[in-house]
Each structure stands twice: as structure tokens, then as C-alpha cells.
Amino acid sequence: MYHLVSFRKLSNPDIFAAVMRETRVTLLVRVPESLKSRLAEIAKRERRSLSKQVELLLERCLEVGSEERVPAPVKGGRQKGN
């Protein structure tokens, strides 16, 4: 189960300012329709484009993950039995 939390308290404005100065590239990602719908709902509520919302969530996830030293996923995706 995923919980929607307000990441505004977790964000580091310096990271986002640095990201905005970088060259923009396209990243194509395939996701289930239900996930896209959930992301679109969040983006609408936060008054952002879907693309900008996904970028923001990824940045914040990486920021939190680096602080918590979350291990990288095992190559090959999900493990059997999970």
C-alpha cells in the first residue's frame, strides 16, 4: 500500500533549482494506466503538469532515498515470492 504524503516538507529547494539549470531530455516510461491516472490526479491537485509532477516525485524520492541509504533494486525486477 502506498501513502500519499506531502513532500513539500521534505524538499530541498537548492536541489530543484540546480535541476532546473540542467539540459532537459526526454525519458519514455511505460506505466500501468492506473498509475498514470493516480499521478495525473496528484498533478491536477498540485496544479502541475503530469510531466513536472513525475519529475518532482522522482527527485524527492531520490533525495529521501539517499538520506535513508535505500539499497538499489536487484537487477531483473521483482524477486519471486514478493
Image: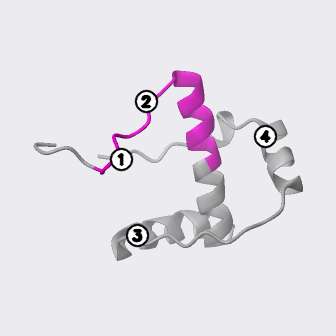
Which circle's residue, 1 or 3, is located before the other in the chain?
Answer: 1
Q: Residue at x 61, y 69 (%)?
A: 27
Question: Which residue is under mark 1?
Answer: 2
> Callout 3 environment at 10 Å: few (<14), some (14 to 19), or many (20+)?
few
Which circle's residue, 3 or 4, is located before the other in the chain?
Answer: 4
Q: Whole-Å distance between the Cαs marked 3 and 4?
A: 26 Å
Give the secondary structure at mark 1: loop
- Figure check: 25 above or below 78: below
Question: Which residue is under mark 3?
Answer: 31
> Callout 1 environment at 10 Å: few (<14), some (14 to 19), or many (20+)?
few
Q: Is residue 66 magenta?
A: yes
Q: Which label number is shown at residue 71?
A: 2
Q: Is 40 on the left or on the right of 73, as rendered?
A: right
* Frontmost residue, 28 versus 38: 28
Give the secondary structure at mark 4: helix
Question: Which residue is under mark 4?
Answer: 15
Give residue 28's position: percent from left, percent from top.
55, 73
Comparing marks 4 and 2, which lies closer to the viewer?
Answer: 2
